[in-house]
Image (cartoon, grey):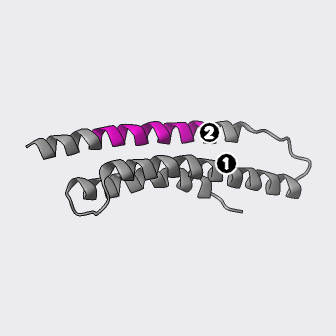
Amino acid sequence: MFGITPLILLALPLLFQLIFGNKTIRDKFSITLSNLAFITLISQVVLSIVSYKIALYNFNQYFEQHPNVTKCGMGFLGLIGLAGFFTIALIIVIIVQYFINRYRKSS
């Protein structure tokens, strides 16, 4: 029912950090980089849980409509792996933006 919503939810914190992190580095945003990083890390955890719950709901709805189909939960393993990948990518982006911000302020 919700289609690719779980995948979109996993990518949102990374996109948020990329967009608003650049604005913060260029001093066009009122929030500090450390606060922004904290917000995105917390939202990554929360949205990963919400994404899992939505995927579980989709899974249950599909098998209520098709009761004679073999059930396989490997899609959840992929979703958890993708959540881990986006979390690692988010941490790398935060570290790179921190060093860019520190370099710009020292110059």
When the figure is inspected, residue 68 is found, relative to residue 81, above or below; the finding is below
Q: Nearer the viewer, residue 69 or 43?
A: 43
Please state which amino acid type lies under the numbered disc 2: Ile
Q: Is residue 50 left or right of residue 94?
A: right
Quadrant in which the C terminus is drawn? top left
Residue under label 2: 80
The span from disc 2 to disc 1 (Cα, nearest Å) is: 8 Å
Q: Is residue 28 left or right of residue 84?
A: left
Please state which amino acid type lies under the numbered disc 1: Tyr
Q: Position of residue 1 (x, y in %)?
A: 72, 63
Instruction: Tell me, yes or no, whether the two marked residues, 2 and 1, touch with CB atoms within 8 Å.
Output: yes
Q: Position of residue 40 (x, y in %)?
A: 45, 51
Residue 30 lies in quadrant: bottom left
Residue 104 lies in quadrant: top left
- Predominant SS of the magenta segment: helix
**What's the magenta region?**
78-96
Q: Is residue 41 magenta?
A: no
Residue under label 1: 52
Q: Position of residue 34 (x, y in %)?
A: 34, 47
